[in-house]
Image (cartoon, helix red, strand yellow):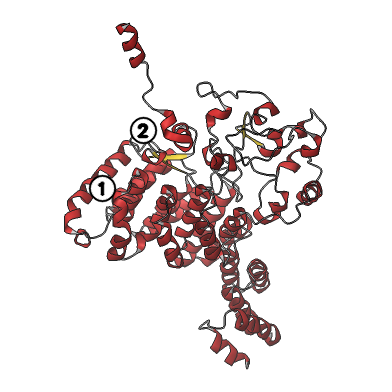
């Protein structure tokens, strides 16, 4: 009997999954089943995911703006957007934890809960026969009658690997034109368009006024919309939104600089560790005292990913800016962070983080080499290419900066968004170094790759105007204004273009619009005087 007791003890699980709860259980799976950045400590069984890795947000080329899968993202980021995740559904409700096979085939899997007598575990579910024509509006037994084809559309990777989207979303073809995202309906009905599909769904479910979707705000940010800060702030502040969505908004806001700081300062106080982690980088450019005031408490955060982000943002500050009692522990933590990055440097993302840390610590030659190494690991890793070009240019290596960008643009099958950003950066760099003739073609390439970015159209228009290509300049500025009708820079560019050509009437029309949408713009008084308005 004693032998049997010992054997049972030896075979007991290391992790008490029941004690972890639904979210904790999912995070045990997520270390492998997620797109993530490892923190150099390996998997931490029984601990929160953010002690071992930082999951990717809904970034371009990984996800469409509405959160549907685009790149290979390994399920977790999709599932955490779902109402099922919020309600406490776990991976093991549908999958065998050892084989990952589904427990039941076809609609029976969903019918475990979605039925006429819902489980007491999920009392909010509507009692309904979901496996019926009245619900799915397709012939019984057809592909359209399968739950997964409407609520989990599949994407095929590498030509052979079909993965289903685990966000379990309602089909929203009405969003396609707002978010540039695909819809489940026209994946099957290839001869129809999203407008047709939206009309069909509205007629079936009497739902012509569907609620706003976070994808609209994320798409506005991707397009560089003037109201992006406000819209992203609303997403972050809505605690009913999935935390990966709020973290995505925080990451996007962090790229927008000073206007985003008040919103992100509030985000640092949110319960979500993921939101806190992605809000932190925005503070890296603040003066040392301001950085310390906001980020020092996060060095004691319960989650290693948050502590690491705070360390990287605080790196490079004069140590005298820290309270004396924290200086030694800060230096120790920073050294440990660098050691972990170096120990996990077989991945380009960790090389990038190491390079950023070294750059902020004024170890710029080392940083340059780490950026180069990241690109050797993955030539398509655009963040490392952008940072390398920026640092090379800042350290008087303009030839290397230009070549790095040209090398990236020469790669076959570069994602369109990355290609557009690299072309835009190259064009700006060539202008900076007195080569506008070469720059204009790359700016045109950027405008073609990123047609919804009004800022690129603005800079393209100015460059064409500088080269006396007035008709093309006008077309580019007007294209930008069609995207952002209240953009004062685009209006000013068109005022200058028409005014310098002697077309006073058109110049006055744009001046009146500028006076209406940007009455405090400092350029406006001189414009109005010159035009006699």
Compared to residue 441, the image places residue 24 above or below, namely above
Q: How many discs appear?
A: 2
Query: Looking at the picture, how far across and down is residue 66, in whole percent?
Result: 61, 50
Mark 1 crowd level (few <14, some 14–19, many ≥20, 10 Å Cα): some
Reading the image, the residue beneath label 2 is 44
Residue displayed at 35% across by 38% down: 345
Residue drawn 34% across and 43% down? 304
Disc on res. 334:
1
Image quadrant in which you'd find residue 412: top right
Q: Position of residue 254 (x, y in %)?
A: 44, 58
Q: Is tag 2's residue or tag 1's residue first in the polypeptide sequence?
A: 2
Q: Name the one closer to the observer, 291 or 266.
A: 266
Front in this rendered view, residue 365 or 431: 365
Q: Secondary structure at mark 1?
A: helix
Tell me if I can see residue 257 in this picture: no
Would residue 515 appear left or right of 436 to someone viewing this image? Answer: right
Question: Which residue occupies 38% across, 46% down?
Answer: 352
Q: Quadrant of residue 2?
A: top left
Q: Which numbered tag is attached to residue 72? A: none
Q: Quadrant of the N terminus?
A: top left
Image side of residue 199 versus residue 5, left or right: right
Determine whether the residue tagged by mark 2 lies in a helix, strand or loop: loop
| Near-viewer residue (89 or 140) | 89
């Amino acid at each position: 009997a004693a032998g049997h007791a010992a054997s049972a003890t030896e075979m007991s699980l290391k992790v008490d999954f029941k004690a972890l709860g639904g979210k904790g259980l999912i995070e045990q799976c997520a270390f492998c089943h997620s797109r993530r950045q490892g923190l150099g400590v390996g998997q931490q069984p029984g601990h929160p995911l953010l002690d071992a890795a930082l999951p990717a947000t809904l970034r371009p080329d990984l996800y469409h703006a509405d959160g549907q899968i685009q790149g290979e993202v390994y399920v977790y980021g999709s599932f955490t957007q779902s109402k099922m995740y919020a309600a406490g559904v776990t991976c093991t409700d549908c999958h065998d934890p050892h084989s990952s096979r589904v427990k039941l085939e076809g609609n029976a899997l969903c019918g475990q809960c979605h039925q006429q007598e819902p489980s007491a575990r999920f009392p909010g579910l509507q009692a309904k026969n979901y496996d019926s024509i009245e619900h799915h509006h397709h012939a019984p037994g057809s592909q359209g009658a399968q739950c997964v084809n409407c609520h989990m559309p599949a994407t095929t990777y590498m030509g052979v690997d079909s993965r289903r989207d685990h966000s379990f979303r309602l089909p929203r073809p009405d969003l396609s034109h707002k978010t540039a995202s695909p819809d489940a309906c026209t994946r099957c009905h290839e001869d129809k368009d999203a407008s047709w599909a939206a009309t069909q769904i509205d007629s079936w479910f009497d739902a012509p006024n569907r609620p706003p979707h976070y994808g609209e705000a994320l798409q506005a940010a991707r397009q560089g919309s003037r109201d992006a800060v406000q819209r992203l702030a609303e997403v972050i502040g809505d605690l009913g939104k999935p935390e990966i969505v709020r973290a995505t908004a925080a990451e996007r806001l962090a790229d927008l600089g000073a206007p985003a700081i008040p919103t992100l300062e509030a985000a640092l106080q949110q319960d979500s560790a993921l939101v806190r982690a992605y809000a932190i980088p925005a503070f890296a450019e603040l003066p040392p005292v301001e950085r310390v005031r906001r980020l020092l408490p996060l060095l004691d955060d319960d989650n290693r990913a948050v502590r690491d982000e705070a360390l990287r943002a605080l790196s490079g500050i004069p140590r005298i800016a820290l309270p004396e009692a924290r200086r030694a522990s800060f230096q120790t933590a920073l050294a440990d962070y660098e050691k972990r990055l170096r120990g996990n440097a077989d991945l380009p993302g960790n090389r990038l983080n190491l390079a950023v840390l070294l750059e902020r610590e004024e170890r710029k030659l080392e940083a340059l080499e780490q950026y180069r190494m990241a690109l050797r690991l993955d030539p398509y890793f655009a963040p490392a290419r952008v940072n390398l070009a920026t640092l090379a240019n800042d350290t008087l290596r303009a030839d290397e900066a230009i070549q790095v960008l040209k090398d990236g643009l020469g790669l076959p099958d570069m994602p369109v968004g990355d290609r557009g950003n690299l072309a835009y950066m190259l064009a700006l760099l060539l202008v900076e170094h007195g080569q506008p003739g070469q720059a204009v073609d790359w700016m045109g390439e950027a405008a073609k790759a990123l047609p919804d970015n009004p800022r690129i159209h603005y800079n393209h228009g100015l460059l064409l105007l500088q080269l006396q290509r007035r008709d093309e300049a006008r077309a580019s500025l007007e294209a930008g204004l069609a995207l952002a009708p209240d953009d004062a820079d685009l209006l000013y560019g068109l005022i200058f273009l028409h005014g310098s050509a002697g077309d006073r009437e058109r110049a006055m029309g744009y001046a009146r619009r500028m006076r209406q949408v940007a009455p405090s713009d400092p350029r406006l008084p001189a414009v109005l005087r010159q035009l006699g308005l």
